[in-house]
Image (cartoon, helix red, strand yellow):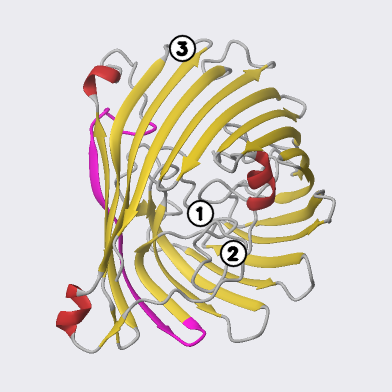
Amino acid sequence: MKIIIPVLIGVVGISPLYALNDYRCKDKSLCELHHCKEVTTISDAFSQGKVEGQIRLVNVQQDNDISIDTYSTALGGQLKYETAQLYNTTLAVSSFISQKITPLTGETSTGENNTDILGPNGESLVYLGEAYVEYERKHFDVRVGRQKIDTPLNDRDDVRMLPNTFEAIMAGYGGVEDFIFVGGYITRWAGYDSGPDISQYKSILGLANSGIALAGVMNESIENLELQLWVYNLDGYSRISYTDAVYATEYKSGLSIESGIQIGLYKELEDSGTDGGAYGAMINLGYLGANLSAAFNVVDSKDDKSITLGYGGGPYFTSMEEMTIGGVNDVQAYVLGFDYALLDVLSFHYAYGSFVNDTVDIKEHDIVLSYARDDWDLELSYAMLDDQFNVAVASSGYKRFLLRANYNFKTEQ
């Protein structure tokens, strides 16, 4: 599930515009290509490369209404090396690590181990999360291999210890003013949303010789307005189109307004069960560090079919810490939120969400505290989910506490 922290960031940032070399990032700006140091020899390319990474501590505890409670703690993160640029080409590898802290982790044999941040049997993880070659020249960029990707229906969803990463070829072109064009093909993935063993790369569609072809265009030519349109072909599964528009403005009084609309259309292929439409709107009002937000989504899917978030957290405005509209037939969802930021380092977030159809009535409350300063950041979140129609089902309701502490570092070329 996608975690939105806070709603000010989440509601508006769920569906950002992705720049040519930044469509993998959670950044709405149309930034330029990143510039690696250029060298002339292979030796210099490796000796003058750069190292960057993150050390992360995570504790997750889930108090289930029916089934046994679970908890886990791990220390890990990412360590990445990227060469300097030789003939417009760079190479990069990144190790992903999650090391269990045994005294603070439940036993697998008793069912108390929470596997959100560990392997399916509660084991520690080490794997190659990124390994790619990238070529960039002027306004063109292409990356091949294991990589982080953030498009509306394929994203890193970095909400526990390690993000989703994808085996893909992705290309972008930004030579037309105010436009970014992106295309690619994805075959396999690993990470938080990919299945029980997050360290194993597996077919993204669960089918041999299958993958996802995608193309997108982003535009920022109209002042204060960001537009994007994406199309996806999931081999033998579904054809999907997604579009949104986000308008943001700020007045001299300090009042800011952000609003948006979105549409996702799904065409079923080969009885996959994915068919229908998703529609949404949101608005956010901000003043002197305080923000009020509201978001709405409705899903129209007939004959017990449903829509999908894709492969990651998804783009929809009502995505909360735990609950989303993905996989729920004909659901109506709304989220109301409040945020307050203090001195640009400390923020508080509260959100209430409701997801309802003929057989579902789920309420969720989210509380999040976050602190960021220099290279450090800390996040505490508490989610309370209540399924009022399925009170006897083991997964019907729970309370989930998450602590994440990060230290980010890098060397300069």
Q: Position of residue 260 (x, y in %)?
A: 78, 54
Closer to the camera in the image, 34 or 148: 34
- Magenta stretch? 116-140
Left or right of 287? Residue 205 is: left
Q: Is residue 169 shown above or below 210?
A: below
Residue type at mark 2: give it.
Tyr
Residue at 23%, 89% in the rendered image: 40
Mark 1 and mark 3: Cα distance apart in space: 31 Å
In the rendered image, the quadrant that contains the N terminus is top right
Count neighbours of disc 2 (C-alpha within 10 A) and say few if under 14, some if 14 to 19, many if 20 or more.
many
- Asked if the residue under mark 3 is in contact with the one under mark 1, i.e. CB atoms within 8 Å, the reply is no
Farthest residue, direction left:
43
Q: Position of residue 135 (x, y in %)?
A: 37, 81
Query: Callout 2: helix, strand or loop?
Result: strand
Q: Nearer the viewer, mark 1 or mark 2?
A: 1
For marks 1 and 3 on the same chain, the one whose residue lies earlier in the sequence = 3
Q: CA distance from mark 1 to mark 2?
A: 14 Å
Q: What residue is shown with label 2?
A: 232
